[in-house]
Amino acid sequence: MPVPTTVNSPYLSSVLISANTTNATNVKSTPGVVHGWALYNINASPRYLKIYDKATAPTVGTDTPIMTLLIPSNSGNNFEVPKGILCSSGISFALTTGITHADTGAVAASEIIVNIFYK
């Protein structure tokens, strides 16, 4: 079985356990490529991960995400994108309780785990 090393590892990862906010987070402040995610939601309602092409943490409700991902209730959303999704400015994300771009509903503490895989 292959063993990952720092030299051969295909992706970097960003891990977050939600706080009682929208968790506006900057993953990479220079151009990058999102290669996948592993998201888990223990709440009885769906939640949303919004990905931004931005070199800083997003202003949730004002900035427009390039992707909105549903995290189903009491479930996960896991996906690999081998060729990746280009973010020419940087990679940032936020978590909200609503689907619209302008939603600013904060998620609860420790209800969501976010793993973003990127280069």
Image (cartoon, rainbow, N blue to C red):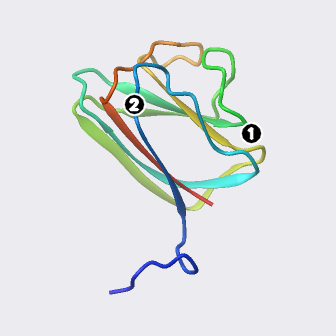
Disc 1 crowd, CA 10 A, few/some/many (<14, 14-19, 20+) = some
Residue drawn at point x = 26 percent, y = 28 percent: 73
Instruction: Determine which of the numbered discs, if any, sits on residue 18 in the image.
Output: 2
Q: Residue 58 in the image: state x and y as whole percent.
A: 65, 27
Q: Residue 82 in the image: state x and y as whole percent.
A: 54, 64
Q: Earlier in the sequence, mark 1 or mark 2?
A: 2
Q: Quadrant of residue 35?
A: bottom right
Q: Residue 40 in the image: state x and y as whole percent.
A: 31, 40
Does the residue at mark 1 contact the one at mark 2 (Cβ under 8 Å)? Answer: no
Residue that sits furthest to the bottom in the current view = 1
Residue drawn at point x = 65 percent, y = 55 percent: 33
- Left-right relation of 41 to 30: left
Residue kind at label 1, given as amino acid type: Ala
- Left-right relation of 43 to 55: left
Disc 2 crowd, CA 10 A, few/some/many (<14, 14-19, 20+) = many
Instruction: Determine which of the numbered discs, if any, sits on residue 28 in the image.
Output: none
Residue kind at label 2, given as amino acid type: Ser
Instruction: Determine which of the numbered discs, if any, sits on residue 55 in the image.
Output: 1
Label 1's element?
loop
